[in-house]
């Protein structure tokens, strides 16, 4: 996925990193935490920040942090992570997730969201 000389990281590693904070995390890169309320999502954010620090070149980690921030109600932080994910995704793999992932529904009406789809 990500470029930059690091090893390729399986999408499941992102979920493994947050599983201790959110039992029953759903698989795949999109739809990680659809069924969780914002107050249940917030405790997982430090784990995602740690994963981002460990794998800064991996777009999916930043993407999932953006999803968590969107679900937690912090649109500014969500867009910061999502823009970074898009920058890291040289192969354009994230486009489908930006278009279809329900985790991003809380910020989809924000004018900044259209920039992610361009």
Image: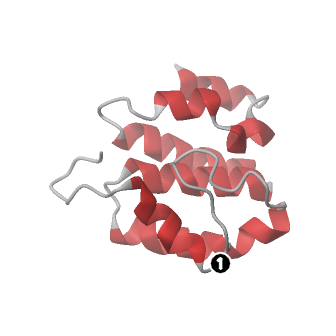
* Residue count near mark 1 (Cα–Cα under 10 Å), binned few <14, some 14–19, many ≥20: some
Classify residue 90 as left or right of residue 60.
left
Please state if 57 lies on the left or on the right of 34 as rendered.
left
* Location of residue 8 with respect to 39 vertically, above or below: above
Return the residue nearer the eye: 36 or 59: 36
Looking at the picture, how far across and down is residue 42, in whole percent? 73, 69
Q: Please indicate whether residue 17 sits to the left or right of residue 72 in the image.
A: left
Residue annotated with mark 1: 21
How many numbered discs, if any? 1
Nearer to me, 88 or 35: 35
The residue most toward the top is 118
The relative height of residue 70 versus residue 105 in the rendered view (above or below) is below
Label 1: which secondary element: loop
Whole-percent x, y for residue 93 in the image: 39, 33
Residue 60, percent from left and from top = 44, 50
Within the image, what quadrant is residue 32 found in?
bottom right
Q: Residue at x 56, y 29 (%)?
A: 116
Q: Residue at x 79, y 55 (%)?
A: 35
- Of residues 9 and 51, which is closer to you in this image? 9
Look at the image and tell me in which quarter the N terminus lies.
top left
Query: Does the image show residue 77?
Result: no
**In the current view of this chain or complex, which residue is farthest to the left?**
5
Q: Is residue 94 visible?
A: yes
79 w.r.t. 47: above or below: above
């Amino acid at each position: 996925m990500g470029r930059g000389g690091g090893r390729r990281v399986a999408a499941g590693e992102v979920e493994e990193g947050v599983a201790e904070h959110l039992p029953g995390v759903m698989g795949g890169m999109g739809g990680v935490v659809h069924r969780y309320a914002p107050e249940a999502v917030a405790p997982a954010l430090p784990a995602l920040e740690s994963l981002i620090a460990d794998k800064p070149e991996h777009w999916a980690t930043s993407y999932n942090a953006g999803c968590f921030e969107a679900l937690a109600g912090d649109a500014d932080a969500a867009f910061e992570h999502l823009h970074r994910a898009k920058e890291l995704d040289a192969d354009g793999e994230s486009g489908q997730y930006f278009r279809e992932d329900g985790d991003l529904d809380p910020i989809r009406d924000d004018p900044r969201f259209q920039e992610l789809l361009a």
